[in-house]
Amino acid sequence: MSFSPPAPSPARRVRRWLVRLFILVVCIVVAGVVWN
C-alpha cells in the first residue's frame, strides 16, 4: 500500500475522459447495429 495517487483532480479527469470515450464507443456500436 505504498502507492498513492498524486492528486484527486487528474484521476477524476481521466475517469471523466474514460466515461466520455465509453459513451462514444456505445454510440458507434449502436450506429453500426442500426445501419446493418
Image (spheres, rainbow, N blue to C red):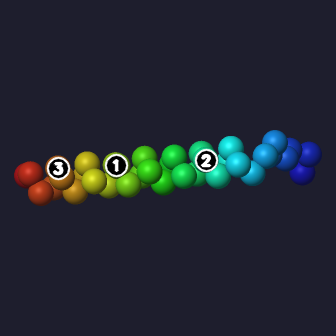
CB atoms of marks 1 and 3 within 8 Å? no
Foreground disc of the pair 3, 2: 2
Residue bearing mark 2:
13
Q: State the count of labels.
A: 3
Q: Residue 31: horizontal and vertical position, in percent?
A: 18, 52
What is the residue that sits farthest to the front in this orientation? 9
Residue bearing mark 3:
32
Q: Residue 5: horizontal and vertical position, in percent?
A: 80, 46
Tell me the tag on residue 25: 1
Compared to residue 33, the image places residue 7 above or below, namely above
Foreground disc of the pair 1, 2: 2
CB atoms of marks 3 and 2 within 8 Å? no
The numbered mark, 1 or 3, whose residue comes first in the sequence reads 1
What is the residue that sits farthest to the left in this orientation? 36
Give the alpha-carbon distance from disc 1 to disc 3, as whole Å. Answer: 11 Å
The numbered mark, 3 or 2, whose residue comes first in the sequence reads 2
Three-letter residue code for mark 2: Arg
On screen, residue 34 versus residue 8, left or right, reads left
Which residue is depicted at the point 68% across and 44% down?
A: 10
- Dot 1 falls on a residue whose secondary structure is helix
Of the pair 27 and 9, the residue shown nearer to us: 9
Three-letter residue code for mark 1: Val
On screen, residue 30 versus residue 6, left or right, reads left
- Dot 3 falls on a residue whose secondary structure is helix
Give the alpha-carbon distance from disc 1 to disc 2, as whole Å. Answer: 18 Å
Which residue is depicted at the point 25% across and 48% down?
A: 28
The numbered mark, 1 or 2, whose residue comes first in the sequence reads 2
